[in-house]
Amino acid sequence: MADWQIELIKVVFIWAWALIIAVVMTWVERRASAMMQDRLGPNRAGPFGLLQPLADGIKLFTKEDIIPERARKILFVLGPPLFALPAFSAYAVIPFGDKIVIGGKEIILQVSDVNIGFLFILALSAIAVYGLVIGGWASNSKYSILGGLRATAQLISYEVPMGLALLTIVLLDGTFSLREIVLQQQGTFLGFLPNWGFFKQPLGFIIFLVAAYAEANRVPFDLPECESELVTGYHTEYGSMRLGLYLFGEYVNLVTLSAITVCLFFGGWSLPYVDMSKFLGPVSYGIASFFVFFFKQAFFLFLFVWVRWTVPRFRYDQLMGLGWKALIPLGLVNLFITALLVQLTT
Amino acid sequence: MPRRPVVQKEYTLGERVYLVEIAKGLKLTWKHFLFNIKASFRQGPHTVPTCWQYPEDRREIAPIFRGAHMLKLNDRGQELCVGCGMCARACPAKCITVKRGKPAEGEEEKYAGKTMSVVFEVDMLRCIFCGNCEKACPKGAIVLGQDYELAEYEPALCIYDKERLLANFQKAKAEGRLKPPPKPIPVDAPPPKKKVAAKANMAVKAGRKQGVEKQPNEQKDKETS
């Protein structure tokens, strides 16, 4: 097989895989929330209600596509893709496995190993906010515009701490490439802990996680779309598959964010204390690394759902206060200490 | 009673950091999650404690539930209804139509009384299921049963005629869902004794009836009691 064919297969595979996880996540979200609230959730369509997302998709596709009369039509149409596309593209730089050897050819399980790695992801996630703001503005409705405004306010309060938390990882590993960061997390730290970013940067991890919840627009920071105050905020006026694209992009965003968390703080595809490549064949090692990565990712996906049904929503000013008064100083202190330690030890 | 002042609680450091409290909350939701996951793997109906999945799981109905009507037969298979129309009079929704008649020649065996109802219709669209017909019936012939799924495709089908009411009874009898006989009201039980305060109350009421000028009297009553 030519190189471009392999690349194409990788692109299609990872795209489909992210889609499948996102679809299953909508089901997990509904069933798990039901179980946490002593309900049952959708359990009629298919076994355990697993076909429910399919039914929802068919419903969204066959609904009438309405554009409000007073809306700004071009921007209104542009909003949902602008939100969903960055979420999909960000998955391109994530290493979802180590490498697999087929027919003497070594294939790296990553669509492209860009050397600016998660700078790319940060840039895309900043673009995704345009989707919310434009959608909210173009709808010409008071709830939508409030949702859009909140999205911007949220962006400026979480982007900085997130960047600060990620910088510490760069300082430690000396690279932006996600694959190399994962490779450097193998082995042990202080002799007994896995050499994961989580153990080296616990504070950085917490700051990153809080910022990730804000970026994914999830409870406790789902201010742009709070159902109770803003009638789902920026996508109030959207219907049919445009709405579907917004909802779906959100879940793809979750998938991407959990993947980044695993890559940066939990050693990617590597198992702690065990080197899988020693006792597994080249093909089975590739598959095993893929599934190790997936299970770590699944835990963080579940954590998103779990936190959503536990914590109430923050107020608008509380989030700003948390971002500017707590997370940024903490991030700066963390960055300073890390820089000092790195300088002293090397 | 003076109102207690609102004391604003000072948050401790752990509470202001949020993370510990969020962890506590996560523990609680996890407990519910695990419990319900385990419960949903149980066999049989009604697995998750708070949910009855209606068409499959049904709640047990109280024996005195007031559902669809039925006309009773006695042990020898004779209709109890004599067509007196007491139920139609007692009905606040005017949903019962009864026409009295005499049984035809040779059919006297079918009826317990000397007369019978030629027409007996209950309009289920109007019925409010109050149970007054049941109380009014001198023969205990009309009874509210336990069926509650009364939807029909056409309004005309909601008017139950005599055959349907009798069929309801046969069905309930076959399924053993007949209402237990009502508890007899004790006739010669001693009247409940009331204390002196009750008497004073009565005096107050009497005073109100007679007019405003009796008020000082009322106060005296209160003092004596």
Image (cartoon, coloured by chain):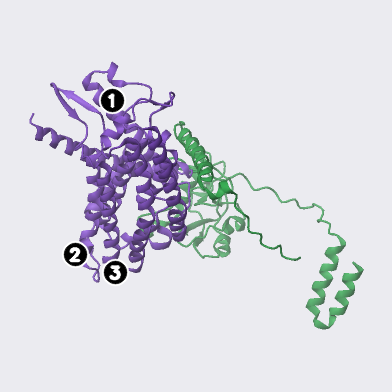
Chain colours: A purple, B green
Q: Is residue A300 left or right of residue B119?
A: left
Residue linked to disc 2:
A74
In this view, B203 is above or below A25: below
- The percent position of residue B11, horizontal first and vertical second, equals 59, 52
Whichever of callouts 3 and 2 sits on the residue coming sooner in the sequence is: 2
The residue lying at 14 percent from left, 35 percent from top is: A7
Judged left or right of residue A327, residue B60 is right
Amino acid tagged 3: Asn
For the image, the number of numbered tags is 3
Q: Are marks 1 and 3 in contact (CB under 8 Å)?
A: no
Label 2 to label 1: alpha-carbon separation = 46 Å
Farthest residue, direction right: B224
User: Which of the two labelled residues, at mark 2 and mark 1, occupies the earlier sequence position?
Assistant: 2
Tell me the amino acid under the disc marked 2: Ile
Distance from Cα at disc 3 to Cα at disc 2:
13 Å
Residue shown at the point (41%, 40%) measured from the top left: A340
Q: Quadrant of the N terminus of chain A?
A: top left
Task: Quickly name the residue at label 1.
Answer: A288
Numbered mark located on residue A215 in the image: none
Q: Which mark is residue A140?
A: 3
Q: Residue furthest left?
A: A2
